[in-house]
Amino acid sequence: MEIELKKLASIQTGIYAKPSISGEVIYLQSRHFNSERKFDRTVSPDLPFDNKIEKHLLKNGDVIIASKGFSNFAVVCDESIGPAVASSMFLVVKNIQTNLILPEFLEWFLNLPQTSAYIQSSAKGTGLPSIGKTVLEDLKIPLPNLEKQKLILEVVKLRCQEDVIKTNIQKLQKKVINHYLISSIK
């Protein structure tokens, strides 16, 4: 079964604000995430807290999607980074019906190469392509039951662990080979 994202959650744009040197709230921007979509925890709060900011605070389970530029990615929000709001570079998926879809499953689906390619093909503009809110609202999401979503996420997690292990093995193999080669010329 597939269902449009707008039937599973609400989508809003991030806010435009002028960051300052200090503040109480982090103004999330694309550059605050590395290539593995992990948040840079050295980022300092740079917006003052006020009523405008309060209603845009990100909550656990919200999903932000980089909607401007050439690198679109989705990340599930985690309040452990502290109070944060998404900049206008993001679209924010809020009020996710977690009885139907897990935020992590939605993140995984949005980051799939084929989903990302579809979303990017719908972007407007040439200098700084931008994904419209309606593109995400109308995006059809496959909806297996929650148990199957959890299983898919577990396989994804194990696959990532496998990649790390393979990389570590390759590094160790290089060290061993280099050690033997250096030993052979002495």
Image: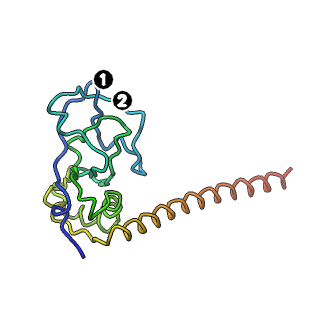
Q: Identify which residue is drawn at 29% across, 63% down.
A: 101
Marker disc for residue 169: none
Answer whether labels 2 and 1 touch (C-beta < 8 Å). Answer: yes
- Report x, y in % for residue 100: 26, 65
Which residue type carries mark 2?
Ser
Question: How dense is the environment of label 1, judged by Cα within 10 Å: few (below 14), some, or many (20 and up)?
Answer: few
Q: Which residue is mark 2?
A: 44
Front position in the image: 88 or 23:
23
Front position in the image: 52 or 113:
52
Distance, label 2 to label 1, CA atoms, is 7 Å
Query: In the rendered picture of this protein, how many numbered marks are placed on residues?
Result: 2
- Report x, y in % for residue 186: 86, 50
Residue occupying the far front of the picture? 99
- Report x, y in % for residue 63: 28, 52
Residue occupying the far right of the picture? 186
Q: Quadrant of the N terminus?
A: bottom left
Q: Is residue 174 above or below residue 27?
A: below
Q: Identify which residue is drawn at 22% across, 64% down.
A: 121
Q: Identify which residue is drawn at 74% across, 54% down.
A: 178
Q: Is residue 34 above or below residue 141?
A: above
- Report x, y in % for residue 26: 30, 33
Which residue type carries mark 1?
Ser
Residue 120 as seen in the image, left or right of residue 77: left
What is the secondary structure assignment of the residue under circle 2? loop
- Say whether disc 2 or disc 1 marks the residue closer to the N-terminus: 1
What is the secondary structure assignment of the residue under circle 1? loop
Q: Identify which residue is drawn at 29% across, 27% down.
A: 24
Residue 138 as seen in the image, left or right of residue 175: left
Front position in the image: 18 or 99:
99
Q: Examine the image and state in which quarter residue 41 appears.
A: top left
Marker disc for residue 22: 1
